Image: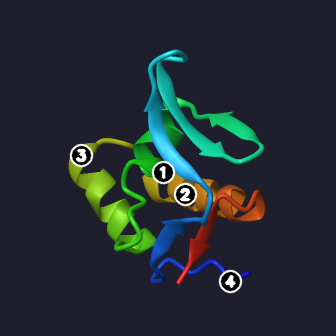
Amino acid sequence: MSEYKREKIVKWRAGYRFQFEPAQNKYVILYPEGMIQLNESASEIGRFIDGKMTTDQIIFQLIQKYPDAAELAVDVDDFMQVAQQQHWIDFV
């Protein structure tokens, strides 16, 4: 497992897919064994995970979208660390 660093590109792990699920009316992560329903904050972060951007770039994009959000970088860091521990994402 690659160590979490903001300057590394983040991507969904092979076999994991982020998408909007109409039946749940929310964004989810689908994987072979099931589905993870995401809250609104996690969904906003997940929408930027495209295998091309670093965590720093994702934070920058979110700050542009939500300039008044306090502690936004901390929230993104927390999500990335949990997502990595749960094996939803990889860093390259």
Residue marked by disc 4? 3
Q: Give how far apart the Cα atoms at labels 4 and 1 are.
A: 22 Å
Q: Nearer the viewer, residue 36 or 56?
A: 36
Q: Are marks 2 and 4 in contact (CB under 8 Å)?
A: no
Task: Say which of marks 3 and 2 sits in front.
Answer: 3
**Element at label 4:** loop
Q: Which residue is mark 2?
A: 74
Residue type pointed to by label 2? Val
Q: Earlier in the sequence, mark 2 or mark 4?
A: 4
Q: Are marks 2 and 1 in contact (CB under 8 Å)?
A: yes
Query: Which residue is tagged 3?
Result: 65
Mark 3 vs mark 4: which is more N-terminal? 4
Judging by the rendered image, the residue that carries numbered circle 1 is 71
The front one of 68 and 54 is 54
Alpha-carbon span between mark 3 and mark 2: 16 Å
Measuring from the top left, give residue 32's x and y in whole percent: 71, 48
Residue at x 38%, y 48% (from the top left corner): 47
Q: Is residue 24 above or below residue 14?
A: above
Q: Indicate which disc, 3 or 2, sits on the residue closer to the N terminus.
A: 3
User: How far, Cα to Cα, is label 3 from label 4?
Assistant: 28 Å
Q: Residues within 10 Å of mark 4 (few under 14, many from 20)?
A: few
Give the distance between the C-alpha atoms of the residues marked 2 and 1, in whole angstroms. Answer: 5 Å
Give how far apart the Cα atoms at labels 2 and 4 are. Answer: 17 Å
